[in-house]
Image (spheres, rainbow, N blue to C red):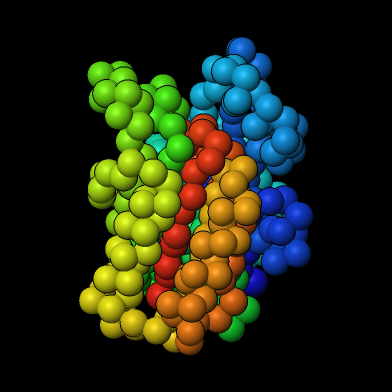
């Protein structure tokens, strides 16, 4: 049984990283001034930030059904089954679209709705690949990933509220008040929801709040206070120096964890956070 794994670029996985891992990555589309671009294909990270910081209106969308079907049909020429892992159904309609399309591929395409995004979605794809290589079927992989969907946590802080306002995540009035007070919100993603966690006045305070929240989750939810059985990652939007500094702090707090992964947030997420965002993500190791 040959099982292929697909995710999308919301995972933060680039086309090159996907190729190296043996995972297919669907590039997410962007609209800028009426023109469509694709993440990591026709739009580079540097070009994206240049346009974002200059005030160009950027919006995101989901891959077209035709593009998804073309990819599935191509892959099924060489594989028996597909495990398709899109971003959280609570944050995008891409998952629901894929679930509907898969109804015509019964027994061949298994769409995973495990409510992950960013590096937690990336880890799901890597776990799925490992399970496929161990001989598990598409159905078994889907069942395992969905059964463990709540075994991850993300905390993120942003430097500006402007892009959350543009994306409809907060009201214009809340954005105006927050900007006047120089508030740095700390948001959390638990399952399929993006919720407010706390408010900070500086990025340093926001970082401290995130670390405290992660320590609590690791101890109380994952029962792993030293990180022995949990993967930790730091992701950012054009804020690498702060991300590396945060990584060092986390290594000291969780001495038994493995290498802490550091990377950029996917551009589709950066559309809503703007430059300067910083996040900590933890995913409990999958027991196979």
The percent coordinates of residue 37 (x first, y second) are 67, 27
Question: Which quadrant of the figure contains the N terminus?
Answer: bottom right
Residue at 25 percent of width and 48 percent of height: 198
| 182 displayed left or right of 118 | left
Residue at 60 percent of width and 25 percent of height: 53
Q: Is residue 57 depicted above or below 89 in this figure?
A: above
Looking at the image, which is closer to me, 229 or 201? 201
The percent coordinates of residue 246 (x first, y second) are 51, 62
Instruction: Determine if residue 249 is in view.
Output: yes
Residue at 62 percent of width and 19 percent of height: 54
Looking at the image, which is closer to me, 87 or 165? 165
* Image quarter of residue 93: top left
Residue at 43 percent of width and 77 percent of height: 253
Looking at the image, which is closer to me, 33 or 287? 33
* Badge count: 0
* Image quarter of residue 40: top right
Instruction: Determine if residue 268 is in view.
Output: no
Q: Is residue 262 depicted above or below 221 in this figure?
A: above
Q: Is residue 230 depicted above or below 262 in this figure?
A: below
The percent coordinates of residue 18 (x first, y second) are 69, 58
The percent coordinates of residue 96 (x first, y second) are 38, 42
Residue that extends furthest to the top in the rendered view of this protein:
34
| 14 displayed left or right of 249 | right
């Amino acid at each position: 049984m040959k099982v292929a794994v697909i995710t999308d670029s919301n995972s933060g996985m680039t086309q090159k990283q996907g190729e190296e891992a043996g995972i297919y990555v669907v590039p997410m589309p962007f609209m800028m001034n009426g023109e469509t671009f694709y993440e990591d294909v026709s739009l580079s990270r540097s070009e994206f930030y240049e346009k974002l910081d200059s005030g160009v209106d950027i919006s995101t969308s989901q891959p077209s059904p035709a593009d998804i079907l073309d990819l599935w049909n191509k892959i099924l020429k060489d594989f028996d089954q597909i495990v398709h892992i899109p971003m959280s159904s609570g944050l995008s309609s891409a998952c629901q679209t894929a679930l509907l399309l898969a109804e015509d591929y019964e027994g061949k395409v298994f769409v995973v709705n495990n409510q992950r995004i960013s590096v937690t979605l990336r880890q799901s794809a890597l776990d799925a690949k490992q399970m496929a290589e161990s001989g598990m079927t598409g159905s078994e992989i889907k069942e395992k990933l969905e059964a463990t969907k709540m075994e991850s946590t993300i905390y993120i802080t942003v430097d500006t509220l402007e892009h959350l306002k543009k994306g409809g995540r907060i009201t214009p009035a809340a954005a105006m008040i927050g900007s006047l007070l120089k508030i740095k919100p700390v948001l959390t993603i638990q399952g399929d929801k993006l919720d407010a966690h706390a408010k900070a006045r500086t990025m340093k305070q926001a970082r401290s709040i995130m670390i405290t929240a992660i320590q609590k989750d690791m101890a109380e939810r994952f029962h792993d206070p030293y990180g022995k059985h949990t993967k930790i990652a730091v992701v950012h939007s054009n804020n690498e120096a702060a991300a590396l500094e945060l990584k060092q702090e986390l290594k000291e707090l969780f001495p038994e964890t493995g290498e802490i992964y550091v990377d950029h947030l996917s551009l589709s997420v950066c559309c809503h956070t703007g430059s300067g965002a910083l996040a900590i993500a933890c995913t409990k190791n999958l027991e196979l």
